Image (spheres, rainbow, N blue to C red):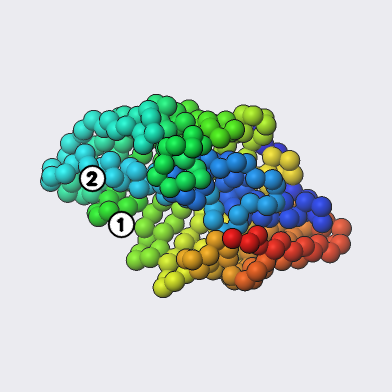
């Protein structure tokens, strides 16, 4: 079970806790990657995840696109309200099945979608099944939301008996997630998720974790808040002081300030720069915390 205590931030653990929380925790490392597929990446070591890519939100966006596509393909013509069956083969094997109910006049819909040995594209290649590194997905999604056009979708997911196995990982996922288009170029992703790494026997959790992403010409900003649980150290509360800014052609942030609060007044602030992120703060006894994480070369 995940550690439920408030984490005592220290010089020893601050980098691991804060960088993992920025990437939606180790949960982000084990659930998905940024290739836009359902494939899992190899579990990263604590504190060395790709901050700024936020793998869990990429996974939620993938589901959002998949469900929206199913809805549009299932109801190609205008109907007042109807329920239709869904059956679609996975890109590399297996299938998804279920039903979608749409109210055309209001744009609202609900769906129950079951993944049966669904195999997506490889995690480290684009639209290829040849490398065998994709993840085998099983479980059921309960979905409700609204759609007015392909780019304007809001929906909520509930994961039921959801497992992802592949590339050396065996993950169980439960809880809820939601994605909403707020305005042109802006979306809000909220997560209350628990993931268990069945190989390592470790559990990670996001609680009331919210990401607000805004797109501009050539770059995107992200603001995160909520609670991130680390299986070993406990949880921290996260607050964005200045939005984290990342260029579209870069994997790493170039600006932004995020604060993490732990037990007994322990506190760490991450400041993102063009080549690295620095962490400064204090532990529960008032001792200084300081570290720097240099972005790996692309």
Decide which of 11, 2 is in the foreground and name it: 11
**Residue that lies at the very extreme toward the bottom in this rendered image:** 217
Q: Position of residue 292 (x, y in %)?
A: 74, 64
**Residue 84 in which image quadrant:** top left
Q: How many marks?
A: 2
Task: Determine the residue positioned at 49% across, 66% down.
Answer: 249
**Residue 242 in which image quadrant:** bottom right
Residue 275 is left or right of residue 89, and the answer is right
Q: Position of residue 136 (x, y in %)?
A: 47, 31
Residue 99 in view in this figure:
no
Q: Position of residue 219 (x, y in %)?
A: 47, 69
Mark 2 → mark 1, Cα distance in angstroms = 12 Å
Taking 119 as reference, is 7 above or below it? below
Q: Which mark is residue 253?
A: none
Q: Which residue has dot 1 on it?
A: 151
Residue 239 is left or right of residue 136, and the answer is right
Q: Which residue has dot 2 on it?
A: 72
Q: Can you say which quadrant of the picture contains the C terminus?
A: bottom right
Task: Determine the residue positioned at 54% across, 53% down.
Answer: 54
Residue 145 is left or right of residue 218, and the answer is left
Labels 2 and 1 touching (C-beta < 8 A): no
Q: Can you say which quadrant of the picture contains the N terminus?
A: top right
Q: Position of residue 187 (x, y in %)?
A: 41, 59
Residue 186 in view in this figure:
yes
Decide which of 94, 3 is in the foreground and name it: 94
Disc 2 is placed on an element classified as helix
Disc 1 is placed on an element classified as loop
Taking 162 as reference, is 19 above or below it? below
Q: Earlier in the sequence, mark 2 or mark 1?
A: 2
The 10 Å Cα crowd at callout 2, few under 14, some 14 to 19, many 20 or more, is some
């Amino acid at each position: 079970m995940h550690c439920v205590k408030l984490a005592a931030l220290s010089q020893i653990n601050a980098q691991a806790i804060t960088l993992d929380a920025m990437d939606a925790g180790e949960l982000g490392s084990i659930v998905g990657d940024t290739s836009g597929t359902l494939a899992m990446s190899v579990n990263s070591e604590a504190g060395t995840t790709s901050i700024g890519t936020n793998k869990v939100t990429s996974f939620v966006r993938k589901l959002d696109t998949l469900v929206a596509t199913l809805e549009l393909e299932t109801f190609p013509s205008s109907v007042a309200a109807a329920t239709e069956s869904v059956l679609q083969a996975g890109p590399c094997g297996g299938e998804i099945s279920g039903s979608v109910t749409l109210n055309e006049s209001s744009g609202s819909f609900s769906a129950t979608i079951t993944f049966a040995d669904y195999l997506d594209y490889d995690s480290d290649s684009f639209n290829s099944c040849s490398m065998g590194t994709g993840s085998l997905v099983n479980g059921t999604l309960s979905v409700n939301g609204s759609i007015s056009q392909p780019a304007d979708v809001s929906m909520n997911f509930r994961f039921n008996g959801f497992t992802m196995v592949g590339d050396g990982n065996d993950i169980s996922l439960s809880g809820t997630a939601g994605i909403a288009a707020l305005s042109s170029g802006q979306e809000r992703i909220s997560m209350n998720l628990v993931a268990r790494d069945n190989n390592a026997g470790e559990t990670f959790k996001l609680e009331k974790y919210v990401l607000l992403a805004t797109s501009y010409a050539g770059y995107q900003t992200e603001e995160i808040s909520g609670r991130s649980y680390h299986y070993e150290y406990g949880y921290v509360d996260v607050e964005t002081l200045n939005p984290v800014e990342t260029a579209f052609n870069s994997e790493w942030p170039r600006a932004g300030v995020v604060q993490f609060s732990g037990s007994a007044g322990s506190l760490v602030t991450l400041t993102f720069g063009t080549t690295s992120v620095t962490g400064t703060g204090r532990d529960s006894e008032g001792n200084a915390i300081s570290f720097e994480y240099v972005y790996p070369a692309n």
